[in-house]
């Protein structure tokens, strides 16, 4: 017995254009990331390496060694 095909609740828009609306953060976050990276390129002296706990560093090195095998 074939299953019934569900119909669309309302017809597709006939305007010919696509109506897509982006949220504000969909444009703001990539723009902010681009600006931050561009600022690091212009002034690399502001980019400081994070100082981590030696135990964390050793753990990450051990994980890297295990994955390299």
Image (cartoon, rainbow, N blue to C red):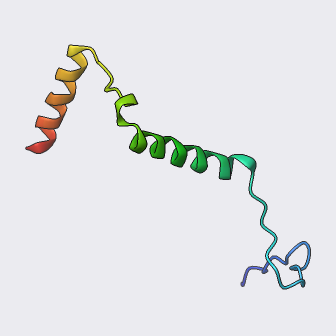
Quadrant in the picture for the C terminus: top left
Residue at the location (36% across, 36% down)? 44
Residue 11 % position (x, y): 90, 79
Q: Nearer the viewer, residue 30 or 9?
A: 30
Describe residue 46's horizontal placement relative to residue 30 as left or right: left
Task: Judge whether 6 appears above or below 59 on screen.
Answer: below
Residue at the location (25% across, 19% down)? 56
Residue 23 % position (x, y): 75, 51
Give the image quarter of residue 54: top left
Describe residue 21's horizontal placement relative to residue 35 as left or right: right
Residue at the location (89% across, 83% down)? 15
Residue 31 % position (x, y): 60, 49
Residue 52 % position (x, y): 29, 18
Q: Nearer the viewer, residue 62 or 29?
A: 29
Task: Judge whether 49 appears above or below 4 on screen.
Answer: above
Describe residue 33's horizontal placement relative to residue 19 as left or right: left
Q: Going by the picture, which residue comes out furthest to the left?
A: 69
Total numbered labels placed on residues in the image: 0
Give the image quarter of residue 41: top left
Quadrant in the picture for the N terminus: bottom right
Task: Judge whether 38 appears above or below 19 on screen.
Answer: above
């Amino acid at each position: 017995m074939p299953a019934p095909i569900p119909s669309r609740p309302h017809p597709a828009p006939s305007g010919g254009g696509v109506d897509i609306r982006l949220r504000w953060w969909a444009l703001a976050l990539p723009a902010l990331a681009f600006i931050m990276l561009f600022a690091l390129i212009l002034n690399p002296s502001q980019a400081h390496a994070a100082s981590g706990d030696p135990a964390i560093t050793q753990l990450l090195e051990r994980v890297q060694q295990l994955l390299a095998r």
